[in-house]
Amino acid sequence: MAEEPESSLQLPPSIAAEGEGPTEVSPETATPEPPSSAAVSPGTEEPAGDTKKKIDILLKAVGDTPIMKTKKWAVERTRTIQGLIDFIKKFLKLVASEQLFIYVNQSFAPSPDQEVGTLYECFGSDGKLVLHYCKSQAWG
Amino acid sequence: MEEDEFFGEETFQHYCAEFIKHSQKIGDGWEWRTSKEALEPPLDDFEVTEPTTATEVIKYEYHVLYSCSYQVPVLYFRASFLDGSPLALKDIWEGVHECYKTRLLHRPWDTITQQEHPILGQPFFVLHPCKTNEFMTPVLKNSQKINRNVNYITSWLSMVGPAVGLNLPLSYARAAFQDEGNVNRQDSSIEPKSLEEP
């Protein structure tokens, strides 16, 4: 069903700590299913157990924001919006002057500490959480 | 729907009213206040007193005003310790959420400034409104594409608020669309003249 490759969003802790470590996350290389690939499989049933830990997120670009090659991600429920923002910014190679916003319902930006698991409970449908993202030079 | 969203003052009032409705439902304390003795341009404000946080006893106060010159809402805020002493701009910056810090520190002078509240006449911090249209437009356009009625105030506040300690409860996200059935842009229950006519 899914046309695009799906990846597990494996965010090492160092991303949250804004370290300039090696690019641990690279969907292209991570696509060869990691051992615990149970989280995401195109169109098939997800094994029990792991489904509790991860949720499916579909990322959609707004405006002139670059579209991510990989749009569908399996993300741990406890991942925060801030973590997701950091990840997308790195992925899209945004510069410091650029802000990235993430929205539920296409218009509401959850606070950065919000966990995606909670958002999934509130706004998810069809087994996934759709999040729109938009980059902006402007702020304020 | 016009290309450029004309966010007039009455549209501002309408969205604030919807926002307040939800606020009253969940009891998070926003109020609508009209300054009766304003001699100046008709700015309305609403004021909230945030309960002090459990970890640091700092009281934040947020006001949303309408800027006639920029034709967008503007967020005014101030913070003080329990003894009433105000926080300085550098303290405010320290409180800014991590994910905004880089952007803010990049060009601090066009983001948070200190200004006199136009009605209260007291010093407040202000999120400069000059770029608001820039970051609001893609969101609004995107929603218009699917005929979704977005509460500008809710959307805007959700985006700028967290940077200065104001986090809207998630229920606002759903509330923004609950009035879709009640208020249609072309068929409004408030003064139709003031809204954008096709």
Image (cartoon, coloured by chain):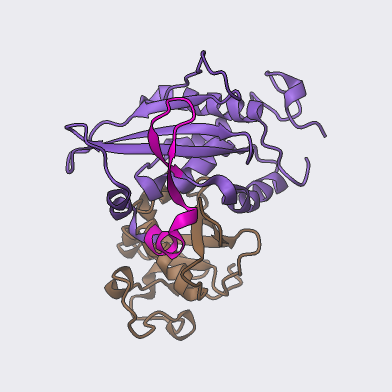
Chain colours: A brown, B purple
x and y, in percent, of residue B21 in the image:
49, 23
**Which residue shows up at 65% across the image and 59% down it?**
A63
Residue interval drawn in magenta: B100-126
x and y, in percent, of residue B88 in the image:
29, 46
x and y, in percent, of residue A96 in the image:
46, 70
**Which residue shows up at 33% across the image and 75% down it?**
A36
Q: Which quarter shows the N terminus of chain A?
A: bottom right
Quarter occupied by residue A79: bottom left
> Quick check: B139 left or right of A126?
right
> Quick check: A133 left or right of B102?
right
x and y, in percent, of residue A33 in the image:
42, 81
> Quick check: B185 left or right of B106?
right
Q: Is residue B111 magenta?
A: yes
Does B93 sit above or below residue B120? below
Quarter occupied by residue A47: bottom left
**Which residue shows up at 59% across the image and 53% down it?**
B135
Does B93 sit above or below residue B12? below
The residue sitting at the right extreme is: B198
The residue sitting at the top extreme is: B36
**Which is more toward the observer, B145 or A118?**
B145
**Which residue shows up at 47% across the image and 52% down it?**
B111
**Which is more toward the observer, B16 or A140?**
A140
Q: Is residue B96 magenta?
A: no
Quarter occupied by residue B15: top right
Q: Taking the image as drawn, is residue B28 in sight?
A: no
Image label count:
0
**Which is more toward the observer, B110 or B187?**
B110
Q: Taking the image as drawn, is residue A83 in sight?
A: yes
> Quick check: B138 left or right of B160?
right
